[in-house]
Amino acid sequence: MLVVVTRRILLIENENAIRELTQLCLETEAGWEVLTTASSYEAIVKTEIEQVDAILMDVDAFVCEQDLSTTLQQLQSNPVTHHIPVILLTTVTTEEVSQMVKLGVRAVIAKPFDLMSLAKQVAEVLNWN
């Protein structure tokens, strides 16, 4: 019997339209379950409660809240969440990308990204092929 594994993604995106479109595309194109939040604080709580396989994190979501490095440190220092790979969605420069990789992110996907190929990019980064 073939067992189908449904991947669970947590999407942290502060813009409603982008969050909804990204969720719809990932669910439709890849068949993943996508949990969403606009808040880094809520994301920390959700990752402790929900069992997610990866986190897609919009860097712009951190403008008004705790900074990105603090959130990543909280995820990495928590025994419940330290194993979850984080992929950043961002418009940052190449110099900033290298700094983010040092913070422990798995990959950086540049914005604007193609919604129809995002699932494929994520799957490649995480070896979900």
Image: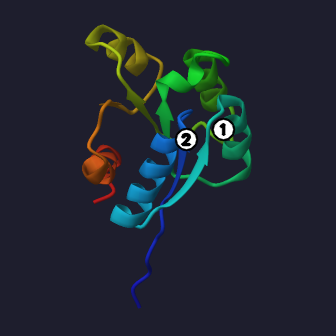
Secondary structure category for the residue under label 2: helix
The residue positioned 34% from the left and 17% from the top of the image is: 97
Q: Say the numbered circle drawn on residue 16.
A: 2
Q: Can residue 120 be seen in this snapshot?
A: no
Residue 8: horizontal and vertical position, in percent? 53, 57
Secondary structure category for the residue under label 1: helix
In this view, 47 is above or below 128? above
Name the image quarter holding residue 14.
top right
Residue that mark 1 sits on? 43
**Three-letter code, disc 2:** Asn
In this view, 35 is above or below 90? below
Name the image quarter holding residue 72.
top right
**Three-letter code, disc 1:** Ala
The residue positioned 65% from the left and 30% from the top of the image is: 40
In this view, 33 is above or below 41? below
Q: Can residue 58 be seen in this snapshot?
A: yes
The residue positioned 63% from the left and 17% from the top of the image is: 70
Residue 69: horizontal and vertical position, in percent? 56, 16
Residue 120: horizontal and vertical position, in percent? 27, 53
Q: Say the numbered circle drawn on residue 2.
A: none
* 10 Å crowding of disc 1: few (<14), some (14-19), many (20+): many
Classify residue 40 as left or right of residue 123: right
Calculate the distance from the C-alpha at mark 1 to the C-alpha at mark 2: 15 Å
The residue positioned 44% from the left and 58% from the top of the image is: 24
Give the quadrant of the C terminus: bottom left
Residue 52: horizontal and vertical position, in percent? 58, 52
Classify residue 95 as left or right of residue 25: left
Q: Residue furthest front?
A: 17
Q: Residue furthest bottom?
A: 1
